[in-house]
Amino acid sequence: MRSLGSFPLIFLLILVLVLLFNILMIQKLEFCGVEQQMEQHSSKILDLDSWIAMAPELVETIEPRFTAFAKKPFVFFHIRKAAGSMLRSTIFKATGRSTTKTWIPCEGRRCIPFSLPPNDKVYNVYASHVNYVHMTQVMRELDANWMNHAMTGTVNTTLENYGNAVVYHLDDSHLNFDCLTNLRPTVSRVVSCWNYRMTLDNPETPKTWSIPHSYEMSANDWETMLPLAYDQYSNGCNNEIARIFGSTQNETAVNTLSPSGVWFDKEFETIALRLSRCVIVLPKRCQESNTILKYYLPWLAKTTDLCREQLNKNQESVGNTLQEHAKEAILEQNYMDELLFQFGEALFEKQLAIAKSHLIENKTNAQ
């Protein structure tokens, strides 16, 4: 007959086995979660590769614009902390400092840099931190011919209590403005935004704020602060390209964009298509950007030298200002913008190749 004293030992052994099983299951779930996240990131990279492969075809649709005051409006979508203030200033100069034909906040008019464009009339030139969707909506309201272009297709469907129905399909591919935008590598842009918009480096920052400088922040600090911090205009520093070219003006949604979000893939495709319709400059590659402007926007190139004119000198190398793993923490929260920047670089390279080819051809024909 088994001794009663052995039961506590058996019970303890069973308890240890249950605990070990639970630990193994938790580790397996964590591993599966990491593996799933890696698969998600891998699929995004594959999507990026396919878009980069389409860059030559997409860029072919952009035609040179020879005057600022063309029938179709011109829009500069200003990406913050990428020499955009300089570009706004030179655009204003190139238009002869006209305030009747241009809408450029802080240039000949009240300086509210994040104000929305008015819908009282169509201006020839817009240059500001405007959102692509909002700009499109303004044009829809003011352009009487827009509906003729947008409502090009029809969709036939059958309704349960009605029968066949025909509805118009909104074709948003009709672009009723020409555009230019400026891009900057993701990490340096975020750090520059942080130091200028959030810390006391900016004289407009409220003195009551107590926010550390970039070099004072650990990787954990970036993970904590970036999704929570907003400047005096209620904008964060994450995902600036998505903020300007994306489909929502919900700042919290933009500032916390994640690859695990259900609409991430669709939003990337939407933004990538919009970005591909604009002339792109990279101020850090100023000579090559000047070449692109000379071909695509000769009216602007006459008064613009991206290598000479820069208002905001806050373009320092961030390599010495970030603590260990801070770069990775920033990129993790700006995954959308990093994909879009890489795609934007591909568009830039193709635009540069086209510009060089045509400028050489024009020079040869002129001789």
Image (cartoon, rainbow, N blue to C red):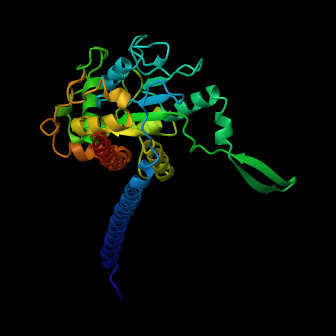
Is residue 360 in sight in this rendering?
yes
Q: Nearer the viewer, residue 5 or 58?
A: 58
Q: Quadrant of residue 27?
A: bottom left
Image side of residue 321 versus residue 60, left or right: left
Which residue is drawn at the image coordinates 56% and 22% (left, top)?
122
Q: Position of residue 346 (x, y in %)?
A: 33, 50
* Above-or-below relation of 21 to 345: below
Outermost residue, front side? 367
The quarter of the picture where the C terminus appears is: top left
Residue at position x 21%, y 26% in the image = 314
Position of residue 271 measured from the top left corner of the image (x, y, whole percent): 46, 44
The picture quadrant where one finds residue 15 is bottom left
Front position in the image: 95 or 113? 95
Residue 203 against residue 21 in the figure, above or below: above
Image coordinates of residue 186 in percent, x first then y, are 29, 41
Quadrant housing residue 334:
top left
In the foreground, 63 or 90 = 63
Of residues 287 and 326, the one drawn nearer to the viewer in this rendering: 287
Residue 42, position as x, y percentages in the image? 36, 61
